[in-house]
Image (cartoon, coloured by chain):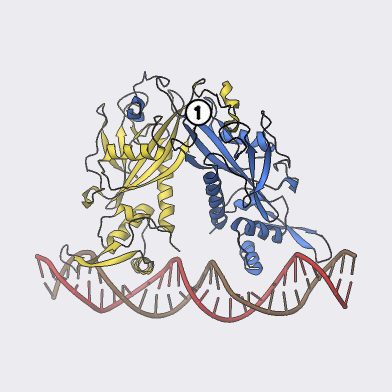
Chain colours: A yellow, B blue, C red, D brown
Amino acid sequence: MCAMDKIDATELPPNYDPNAFEHPSVSVDVVALTARGKALEVLLIQRSEKPYAGYWAVPGGFVGMEEDLDAVAARKLSEKTGVGEAAPYLEQLYTFGKVDRDPRHRVITVAYYALLPAPESGLPNAPTDTPVAGANAAQAQWFDVHDLPPLAFDHAEILHMAIARLQAKLGYTSVAYALLPEEFTLTELQTTYETILARILDKRNFRKKMLSLDILEATGKERRLGAHRPAQLFRWTKREPVFLP
Amino acid sequence: MCAMDKIDATELPPNYDPNAFEHPSVSVDVVALTARGKALEVLLIQRSEKPYAGYWAVPGGFVGMEEDLDAVAARKLSEKTGVGEAAPYLEQLYTFGKVDRDPRHRVITVAYYALLPAPESGLPNAPTDTPVAGANAAQAQWFDVHDLPPLAFDHAEILHMAIARLQAKLGYTSVAYALLPEEFTLTELQTTYETILARILDKRNFRKKMLSLDILEATGKERRLGAHRPAQLFRWTKREPVFLP
DNA sequence: AAAATAGTGTCTATAAGACATTATGTC
DNA sequence: GACATAATGTCTTATAGACACTATTTT
């Protein structure tokens, strides 16, 4: 433990030199999630270097001196997924700071999670289906969260926390908006909920509930797919998360 | 923006030198809350140095290379409040990382909040009523969160987030256990809820609800205070937070 | 007996959950 | 008309909230 441990942030002298002591590094990691059909998928990058060479990791980057945490998260997400200007849902998750979570040196990571519409949705903020690998040719790929490769560092813990947070938020907000295309059927919406919650919901109760919340509106259009009755298309009344009663 | 901004944590070469570039500093700030009578109180320290000399701040400290984030939070809390071994409720709140939140240099702070029983409760983990000032003779004092002195940095934002989190958690967990003494009356419990939520609750509904949750048990003892019927004393069935149905 | 707080029950309204059939399009 | 998915309503149960009086103790 170095001398810095005992310095109180509230009591720093004005001439204190922030570089007089060794600091932990700070990184930002982004759990990018998308609901594709019946799978909840996460974007992972395969490491090509030690430690954890060959293992997969959530994309992340170090925090420089002149960039807000949120900005680092947005930038990393954009670099890896190809999402453009239209802001995806991006929320800080938790900060992981165990001394030995990175075997090389002390790295404190501020984890975020992002919700993206399925790549095939055609939305401007949908990720490209082929994520962008890093400069050192590491692979980037979407994985079903229930069929994961070995994960580096404490990234399994980070991912589980992101999924738990999303599951919880589904219950009291309209965050699901961020996972769906502009227009969708109630069945697609229900499938998204079922995918994330990993359980089957009752169709009548689900529709009754959703339509009572004033968060959806019919577009008047319908989707015709196959030899059966077409489905009405809906959109969100607000493309931002709303707290539900 | 320095070169470090563009280095990807998942792609670090094994011989990367973490000290080759300037890092942000990392601090931990702890919002210590206690419910004393009809006031929710927060522990603040008065700064004696610039910037924000004379302003009040939440206690905090820098994170050294060899200490977990949670451990820094626990240590700071213990130093300032005199709480001992018996662990108070301590939970990570949010990480604040705006570039200019500290005018001196870049400081990213991981905020925690702690719930302590009232100083006069006699519990082993109750804070001393006279909090410990820092080495440079700054004052430390408990303040009603609705009657605050001017706060330094973004500490007003941190405090408001802590209060909002506590209010939310009261609704779906038994965290209130951490604010009460070992034995307490239902009226004291209700007063604690009312203080935190800043609204009056119905006595009959409150008692009906609380007693239906299997989180309280009667001690068989009663408290006699003044010219009126004595109140039964209760204790928590578990001194840890429980999720409520 | 006056004062002060402890303690208690009913009714209503709302929400959640179980449950099966009809409707409408394509091929 | 066979097939496949869309769309819909009722009943039961549990929960939340409004609401006022009696009980017990001290002084």
Q: Is residue B199 visible?
A: yes
Residue B199 shown left or right of residue A63 in the figure: right
C1 above or below B55?
Answer: below
Residue shown at 43% from the left, 48% from the top: A164
Residue shown at 40% from the left, 55% from the top: A170
Q: Position of residue A161 (x, y in %)?
A: 43, 44
Residue B221 shown left or right of residue A82 in the figure: right
A177 above or below A67?
Answer: below
Q: Which residue is mark 1?
A: A99
Q: Chain of mark 1?
A: A
Q: Nearer the viewer, residue B203 or A228?
A: B203
Identify the image quadrant of residue A75. top left
Residue shown at 26% from the left, 28% from the top: A135
Q: Position of residue B225 (x, y in %)?
A: 82, 60
Q: Nearer the viewer, residue B194 or A49?
A: B194
Label 1 SS: loop
Amino acid, disc 1 = Val
B176 above or below A97?
Answer: below
Q: Position of residue A52 (x, y in %)?
A: 36, 27
